[in-house]
Image (cartoon, rainbow, N blue to C red):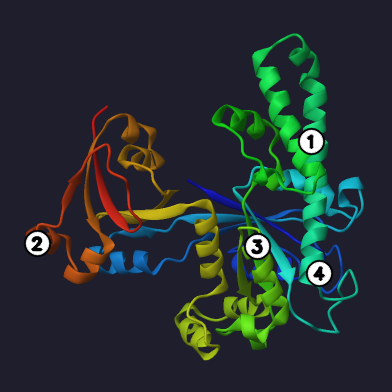
Amino acid sequence: MALKCGIVGLPNVGKSTLFNALSENAKAESANYPFCTIDPNTGIVQVPDERLDKITEYVKPQKTVPTHIEFVDIAGLVKGASKGEGLGNQFLSHIRDCDAIVQVVRCFDDGDVVHVSGSVDPIRDIEIIETELMLADLANVEKRMEKVAKLARSGDKKALKQMEVMGALKTALEAGKPARSVTIDEEGKEAMKEVQLITSLPMLYVGNIDESNAGSGVENKNPHFKKLTDYAAAHGAEAIAISAKVEAELSEIPLVDRKSFLEDLGLTDSGLQRLVKGAYKILGLITYFTAGEQEVRAWTIHRGWKGPQAAGVIHTDFEKGFIAAETYSYEDLLKYQSVSKIKEAGLMRKEGKEYVVRDGDIMLFRFNV
C-alpha cells in the first residue's frame, strides 16, 4: 500500500527546504520569501529501513525493493486562506486524498528569515493553519448538506445518515474542533469518506529547528519546540524535531558518509527516518518483508492485519487463494544469518488465515487460485 502525506504550514517556515531534502527528485523551489511554492510539488521517497539492508546481506537477491512514501508540498497557508487569501487554499484539494498531514512549524529564531506574522510563535501558527483547514472542511460539509437535504426530507435512508453525520461534523467544526474528534460509527464513516475532510486525517507536527538544536534533548534546548510537544501531547498527536537545514546538508553528502555526519551532530536517525516512524505510528502501520533469490522487498500494511490481508497487498489473487504463509522473524535471521539455519533450528513457522502479521516478519505466501 502506498503511503501519502500532505505537507502544510505557513509560508516561509521551511516546508520546501524540507521537501527538497526528503524527495528524490527535489524539484521544489526554496527561497526566503512568502508564497515561493506556487504549484503543489510531489516527491516519491524510498523509506529507509536498516532491516531491508540486513536481509539483503544475508539472502543475496538479484534486487532489493524498498517501500515508498509520497509527499505533497502545497503553497503556504495564511490567515484567511479559506476565504481566498494567499495561494495555499487553491491547492487543498491535492491533500484531501492523503493518508496523513505533516504540519511544518517554525521553531527557530533567525532575524534574516522573514516570518509572515512577524514573530516566532508555534502555537499561534498551528492555530492559524488548523482554523483554515477546519473552515475549508466546514464549507465542504455545508455543501454536502445542501446537496442531500431534499433526499433526506423524502425519507431516503442513505441521505438521512449523511445528514446525521454531516450535522455532527458541522457542530464540531463550528466549535473549532477537527473532524477527527467526532466519533462516528462504521456506516457513518462511509458517508464521511465521500466529503474527504482534511481535518479527519491524523496530524504529525514537525518542528523545524535550528542546526544547533539538532542533537538529543532538543526539548530542553529549544523552548519553541517544547511548546510544540506539549501542544501535540495535549491533542493526542505526535511531534518530531527536524532541522530542514541539516537535512538539506545531509542530502548533499554521499550515502557512505551520512552516518558519521549524523553522529557528529548527536543524531542516530535522519529526519526522513524520524518522519517515517512518526507517520507509521499515527497511522498504525508496520512493515513485513518478502525475501528470495529474485528480490527482497518491504511491504507496508496496517497493524493488526491477518495473513490474507497482508498477502493481498502483493496481489489480490494472493488474498483470494491464500493457503498459508511460511514465516520467520527478522531477529531470527540476524541471529542465524541464513534461512537454512533458521529451518534447522525449527524456527520456520507455517501460519494460517488467522495469523496476525507482526512488524519485521519475513513471509513466503502459499496460495491457489
Label 4 element class: loop
Q: Nearer the viewer, mark 1 or mark 4?
A: 1
**Sequence-first disc among 1 and 2:** 1
Circle 1 is placed at which residue position?
Answer: 140
Label 2 element class: loop
Mark 3 nearby-residue class (10 Å; few <14, some 14–19, many ≥20):
few
Could you give the CA–CA distance between mark 1 and mark 3, rounded to whole angstroms? 27 Å
How far from the left and from the top, in percent, is residue 260?
47, 87
Mark 1 nearby-residue class (10 Å; few <14, some 14–19, many ≥20):
some
Horizontal side, residue 33 vs residue 343: left or right:
right
**Sequence-first disc among 2 and 3:** 3
**Sequence-first disc among 3 and 4:** 4
User: Dividing the picture into quarters, in which one does residue 250 lie?
Assistant: bottom right
Circle 3 is placed at which residue position?
Answer: 234
Q: Which mark is residue 12?
A: 4
Could you give the CA–CA distance between mark 3 and mark 4, rounded to whole angstroms? 26 Å
Task: In the displayed orientation, state which residue is furthest to the top.
Answer: 154
Query: Can residue 26 be seen from the camera position used here?
Result: no
The kind of residue tagged 2 is Ala
The residue at 81%/69% (across/down) is 12
The kind of residue tagged 1 is Asn
